[in-house]
Structures are given as C-alpha cells and as structure tokens.
Amino acid sequence: MVERSRIIGGTFQVFCALACIVIIAMLAVILGNILIHGLGTISFKFLARAPEAGMTGGGIFPAIFGTFALVVLMTIAVIPLGVATAIYMHEYAPKRSRMVHLVRLAIQNLAGVPAIVFGLFGLGFFIEFVGRGVDQTFYGGKLVYGQPAIIWASLTLALLTMPTVVVATEEALRAIPQSYREVAYSLGATRWQMIRRVVLPQAVGGILTGGILAVSRGSGEVAPVMFTGAAYFLPELPTRLNNQFMELGYHVYVMTTQSPDVEATKPILYATVLVLLSLTFLLNFSAIMIRAQIRKRLRYGR
Amino acid sequence: MGASARSLQTAPHSQMAVSVRTEDLRVHVPGAEILKGISLEARKGEILSIIGPAGAGKTTFLRCLNRMAELDIDVKVSGKILVDGESIYDYDVALLRRQVGMVFSVPIPLPMTVYQNLTFGLRLASGTHGSYGDRVEKALRAAYLWDEMKDRLNEPARNLSGGQQQRLCLARTLALEPKVLLLDEPCSGLDPISTGRIEEALRRLKENLAIVLVTNNVKQAARASDRTAFFLFGELIEVDFIEKLFTTPRDPRTSDYISGRFG
C-alpha cells in the first residue's frame, strides 16, 4: 500500500515538473523564434520611420507611437472609472446590497465578453451613437467625432480592461483590516476622510497592480481597436483625439493577412512583433516603477 | 489605588458632573436583543468598569456610546444616550467621536509614524498639518509613554512593542481631549507591567474625564475602577461601588460570576 502510494506520488511530482517545463519551453520557443528572426531588422531607421513600399519596407514608428498613445489614453480612462466603481462597491454601498450584487455580476460577465464584441460595441456605441450625437449637437452634422478615432479606441479598450482594475482594487480594499476603518471613525473621521487618509494610501499598491494588468492586457489587443480607430496605413501621427492611428498589433495583423509580398514582409513582421512585445514590457515596467515610487511616498511605516 | 480613589468614592455623587448616561438603552439585531434596557451613568472623576461573561453585551454597550454600533448593519439602537446632558444624536457624529474617545481591545496603530498616529485625529479636525507638539507631548505624558517615545516620534508605529502600541492608541485618543474615554478590554493582550502602566494612567486621567472600562478580568475591575457594573445576557444585573459589589453583592448571579463559579 505504502509502496503504491509512493509510486503514484512520484509520478505526480514528475508530471507537475514536466508541466512547468512545457510552459517554460513554449515561452522560450516563442521568444527565441521572434528574437532570431526579428532582431536583424531592428534598426534606428526601422523604429523612427513610417512604412514604405506597400509595407514591404520602411519602419513602424507611427504604430509604436499610436500604441503608446492608445494605452496612455486607455489608462487615464480606466483607472478612475475602475477605482471609483470598486470604492463605491466596497466602501459606500450597504453590505448585501442588491445593486452591488448586480454590478459585480455585470463586471464578471464583462470580463468574459470576447474582445471582438467590444470592438463592435465600440463601433456601435461610441462612434455611431456618441460620436454622431456630438457631431450633430456641436458641429452641425459635420463629421468630426462620428468616425473611428483614437479616443473611441482607447475608451473601448478601457471598457475591456475595466474588470481587471475593479477586481484588483476590490482585492486591495478587502485586504485592509476593518479595524483601521474603525480606528479612523473612532478618531472622528468622516467616511471621505477615512477613505482618503487610511484606505487609499493602503490600497494604492493594489490599485496600480490592477493598472499594470490592464496595461498589459490593453497593449496587446487588436480586435477592439480595428473597428474603432486603428488605421490600415497612416504615416501621420495622431495629434488630436479624433484622429485615426496605427497600432502595432493591428499592423501585425494587416501585414500577415494583406501583404502583397509575403516574403518581403516576413522580416518586418518579426521585427514588429518584437517591438510590440518590448513596448508591452516597457509599459509594464514603467507602471511598476511608478507603483514603487508612489508606494514609497504614501506608505510610511512598513 | 490608595486613599485618593477611596475619597472619591465617598464623595456625594449628586455633586459630580454626569458625563455620559444611558436610559433604557436597547440594541436589537435580527432575531435577538443584545441589550435589554440598560440605564447606567459614568461620571467625570470616576472609572466605571463593566464586567460580565462573553456575549453579555459589554462591547456593544460601549460602542453605542460613540455611535460605533451603528456602523454594523442590521444593528438597531433605541433609548436615550446623553453626553453632558445632551443627546448624542444632536451632536455631529465626527465631533461626538472626538469627545467620546475609544481604545480598542487590540492595539491598532495606523500604518504611519508614531507622530502621525498621534496627530491623526487632530489633522482630521483642523484639516491642516499645523504644529501639534504640545498636545502630542501632553497626550504621551498622560499615557506614560513620553520618555520612551520622545526620540522615536518619526518611527513607524508598527515597530513599537504591544504594550507601547496600546499606550500609543490611548495617547492618540487623548490627544483629542475627550470628555469621555471608552476602553474595550484595553489590556487583554498585555503583560502585567504594561497593564499596570495603563491602569496608572487611567487613575490619573479620571480627574478630568469619565472613563468606562470594559474588562474580562474581574481582578482588574476590582483593582482599577471605582464602580463596577455586572452585565449578563444583555441585562444590567447590578452596579455598585467596588467595595460593595465585590464583598456583598445584592444578586447571587453577581457573586457567582465574581467568584468564578460560571462565565
């Protein structure tokens, strides 16, 4: 009996270790493949110039800039919205409130909606409904906001990543001992003062972790932006909120499916994917650095 | 405690200012009555201790006095609660809680420095980062913590020992100069020396404010307070001076509890 259990145990351990190795190997193959094929094409010219010759030459700067701008705008939109939702649910709403239950259910469902549906929603809601409405009300029907634009793409992405921020923030709020809140109240804090002085400084790390996860998720998504603002080819950079823009993920998609010359596009494709991964990593890294800074400033005493 | 405390007990109570009083205080939660009509008062110049087995409603009673009880959902409080003759519901809640300070059973330093802990309530009240050096020193001295803390004000409060943390919490409450001080088993996790310091601090403090001390330790009630109230299953069984209550209690249940026969 003991012998048998030992064999099963040993097998199980080997199986678990193998599973880990498979994951590491897959990551190594993907990254290695991209590095080997893409590194050769990366040059200053590639990073700093617009695509040329039907995407078989030139660089990808407009896509780098567009992705960066998209993610920054998305973060500006999603953090306040997600954090406010979580704070309302956890700090303001009465416990066991039906409304909170409903909101939580909605958020869980939102997290399960496929990205392409968000894209269609953005097209239908932001562009057709909000954008058109704005045009009709403020621009006399002239086409200004009622078309794909970076603002609509970033708002669509913000909706997609909002569940991440809400869940991370709620997790952070839940981790704060109830006793801190009671102490703050007992010293004469109003609810707002309690939230501002005790809850937020403690939760800021978790909130920013949510932001980081949202950035990682948002910077790699193609489907939500392809109908809402990403351009097929656009050498000009977006300077206004209603401009279209190039996006790295979408650019990869376009080059893979629409290229006139597959062989000529291949090295560019690899290099673009490499840049996309690096940019995601960079955005992530800067968000982590910002979090470390804010933690240092706000969290005395640890 | 000695002579000074004894002389206070013999002083006629009608001459003392009543700082906090409840009349027929009842607390309901769905399906149960936690407090069944408590009428009790604590006067400036005395320490009123509350004893009783777990579930007697001691903590709930305390939490009613500074309106902390209503933070829990489904808790219904009825009856009169007066601080200095005025209903606590006529006060602004934040102001009330500054005037009726509370120390919890576990030391809960906020995750900031010692100084920031001490000035937390003051900063909330004034909205500024002004200089509170005098009030901080006074509060620390009153909590017998000044000598240990004067050079450690900018240290994280978490670095202090348990006993120091609890005295810091006491000082933090005192910095607001309350009229009434509520203590919920403040020494439950402390060693005898820290407990002694807190009791000593309370003895000095009662000159200026009314103190209500909930304790699970019958000996502490006999040692550190002037009057003791015995709670059982949400009822006030009896309240009397400690000499009376601990020697010749009126109710047999009281004598059973203080002699350790149940609870």
Image: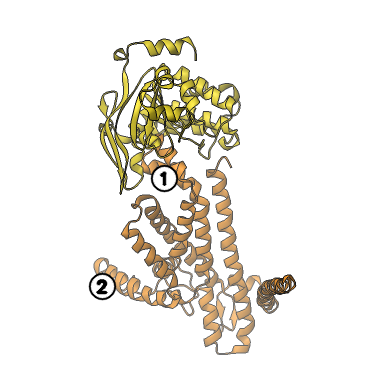
Specify the quadrant of the image occupied by residue A20.
Answer: bottom right
Along the line of sight, which residue is nearer the eye, A187 or A79?
A: A187
Along the line of sight, which residue is nearer the eye, A3 or A52?
A: A3
Along the line of sight, which residue is nearer the eye, A269 or B101?
A: B101
Q: Residues within 10 Å of mark 1 (few under 14, many from 20)?
A: some
Q: Which chain is yellow?
A: B
The chain identifier of the residue carrying mark 1 reads A
Residue B59 is situated, as x and y percent measured from the top left of the image, at 40, 36
Q: Secondary structure at mark 1?
A: helix
Q: Looking at the image, which residue is at 53% across and 52% down?
A: A205
Residue under label 2: A141
| Lower sequence index among marks 2 and 1 | 2
Say whether residue B130 is visible: no
Residue A111 is situated, as x and y percent measured from the top left of the image, at 44, 69
Q: Looking at the image, which residue is at 31% across and 47% down?
A: B74
Q: Would you place residue B233 above or below residue B170 in this image? A: below
Specify the quadrant of the image occupied by residue B46.
Answer: top left
Q: Looking at the image, which residue is at 41% across and 34% down?
A: A187
Q: Amino acid at mark 2?
A: Gly
The chain identifier of the residue carrying mark 2 reads A
